[in-house]
């Protein structure tokens, strides 16, 4: 199984929930109660979108066609009390 790093933009909505989108994968929109939850949902949505590209024989967006296997530094959410 191939893995890539996908750039995700996360913003806090006025009501306190989180919204995730990606310029690299049009159509990726996810909302969650926490940053961790929205990342998990975004990952699932991204996987389903990419699978749909393959199933329909469509070409992946340019940023994903050029993507290399996952490697590098990322930030992860860590909940503290």
Image (cartoon, grey):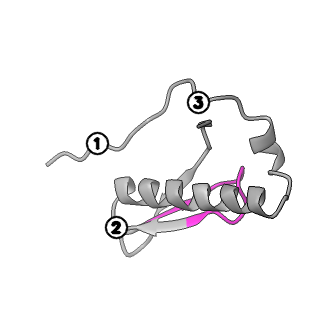
Q: Position of residue 45 (x, y in %)?
A: 56, 62
Name the mark nearer the viewer: 3 or 2: 3
In this figure, which residue is indicated by the disc labeled 1?
78
At 59% from the left and 55% from the top, the residue drawn is: 47
Closest to the observer, 61 or 55: 55
User: Quick one: label 3 or label 2, which is nearer the N terminus?
Assistant: 2
Residue at disc 1, secondary structure: loop
78 horizontally vs 25: left or right? left
Quote the CA–CA distance across marks 3 and 2: 27 Å
Residue that carries the numbered disc 2 in the rendered image:
33
Q: Between tags 1 and 3, which lies in front?
A: 3
CA neighbours of label 1 inside 10 A, class few (<14), some (14 to 19), many (20+): few
From mark 2 to mark 1, how far is it between C-alphas? 14 Å
Tell me the quarter of the image containing the N terminus.
top right
Give neighbour class at mark 3: few <14, some 14-19, many 20+ (Cα, 10 Å).
Answer: few
Q: Measured from the top left, where is residue 62 in percent x and y?
A: 83, 45
User: Height in image: 81 above or below 34?
Assistant: above
């Amino acid at each position: 199984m191939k893995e890539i790093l996908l750039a995700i933009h996360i913003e806090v909505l006025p009501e306190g929930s989180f919204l995730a989108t990606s310029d690299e994968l049009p159509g990726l929109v996810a909302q969650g109660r926490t940053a961790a939850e929205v990342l998990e949902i975004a990952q699932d949505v991204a996987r389903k979108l990419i699978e749909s590209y393959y199933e329909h024989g469509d070409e992946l967006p340019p940023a994903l066609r050029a993507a290399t296997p996952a490697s590098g530094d990322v930030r992860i959410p860590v909940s503290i009390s």
